[in-house]
Amino acid sequence: MSTNKRAYNFNAGPSALPLEVLEKAQQELVNYNGSGMSIMEMSHRSKDYDEVHNNAINRLKKLLSIPDNYEILFLQGGASLQFSMIPMNFLTKDKTASYILTGSWSEKALKEATLFGNAVVASSTKDNEYRNIPSIEDIQFNASDAYVHLTSNNTIYGTQWKEFPNTGDVPLIADMSSDILSRPIDVNQFGIIYAGAQKNLGPSGVTVVIIRKDLIEQANSEIPTMLKYKTHADKNSLYNTPPTFGVYMLGEVLNWVENQGGLETIQKRNEEKAKYIYDVIDESNGFYKGHAEPNSRSLMNITFRLADEELEKQFLADAKAAGFVGLNGHRSVGGCRASTYNAVPIEACIALRDFMYEFQKKHQ
């Protein structure tokens, strides 16, 4: 593959970024806005960075139609730190937190919560090898719970929530790291939405937290300063030095999404991209075997196996030679996975479809 050719990037994260965003960042890397400095070199208290920071917040607010009673925070530590911050702030001794298990990341979130208080399983599809999202009727929680937690898209197993439970007065908290901005959502359904940036939002290093203001005021105050949501909300995420270049890139990705036509357009494109690959699987007469049940399939992570491990190894080796990157399944489950996040172009998905057809013809 020539050095100037873009790879067919199906990495699960960090993942593909829009080419035009990368090219704009390249142009501005050394001298941002005539400042004579890179955005990475300037003070996070400067006028130039302040504009970048607030533009990113406003773009996200506009794209997701985030109401005024929510704060938008740019934090660090990834979604994994949120697994701890959430119970530290909201799981008091007299409360229970309910976790819906749909894969490894929700398991990790539950494990962290048990370090701080009583956390229970509201529903789980582990017995079915996490092939599906639980039916809303099967979710069990109490009106007195501190919160209900779910993972909206499961990168390892390739499943995704199509609709979310109505938890009433109990705050619903969602880890949306791998499908935020992939479709319109009703933010009002959630007390907190959090997401690591490295799938659909930008490079790794930034974590977006969308949190209802009343929850911030109710949070536990007897925890370390940096782990309080209020600390960051009170200072517009500038209490300490933020990941300035990551926020800049996030803002440019948000601008790109807006220029594509917004989330409705992005959703239609994601549906089209995923269909190319799912159609190959469904039409292969079992040559390719999808992991997720059809009604729970993710538009972001398409997981599948071949007949045996030797054939899978051959598939992955041939795919790599053909310019495809990141098709290995997660190390914990093996198999194959194509992550078709927002910035993965339609052409890459068509190319993968054609490659899968040709590989089947050769090896059936």
Image (tube, rainbow, N blue to C red):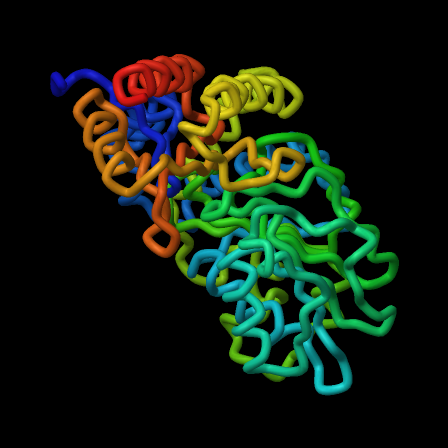
- Looking at the image, which residue sits at the far bottom? 93
Residue at 53% over, 49% down: 195
Residue at 71% over, 36% down: 185
Quadrant in the picture for residue 259: top right
Position of 59 with respect to 214 (left or right) is left
Quadrant in the picture for residue 149: bottom right
Q: Position of residue 90 (x, y in %)?
A: 68, 73
- Looking at the image, which residue sits at the far left? 2
State which quarter of the image contains the C terminus.
Answer: top left
Position of 52 with respect to 34 (left or right) is right
Residue at 41% over, 19% down: 349
State which quarter of the image contains the N terminus.
Answer: top left
Residue at 35% over, 20% down: 356
**Can the viewer see residue 245?**
no
Pick the residue in front: 318 or 118: 318
Pick the residue in front: 280 or 98: 280
**Can the viewer see residue 183?**
yes
Q: Position of residue 161 (x, y in %)?
A: 66, 43
- Count of numbered circles in the view: 0
Pick the residue in front: 322 or 180: 322
Q: Position of residue 172 (x, y in %)?
A: 74, 57
Task: Give above or below for 311 relative to 111.
Answer: above
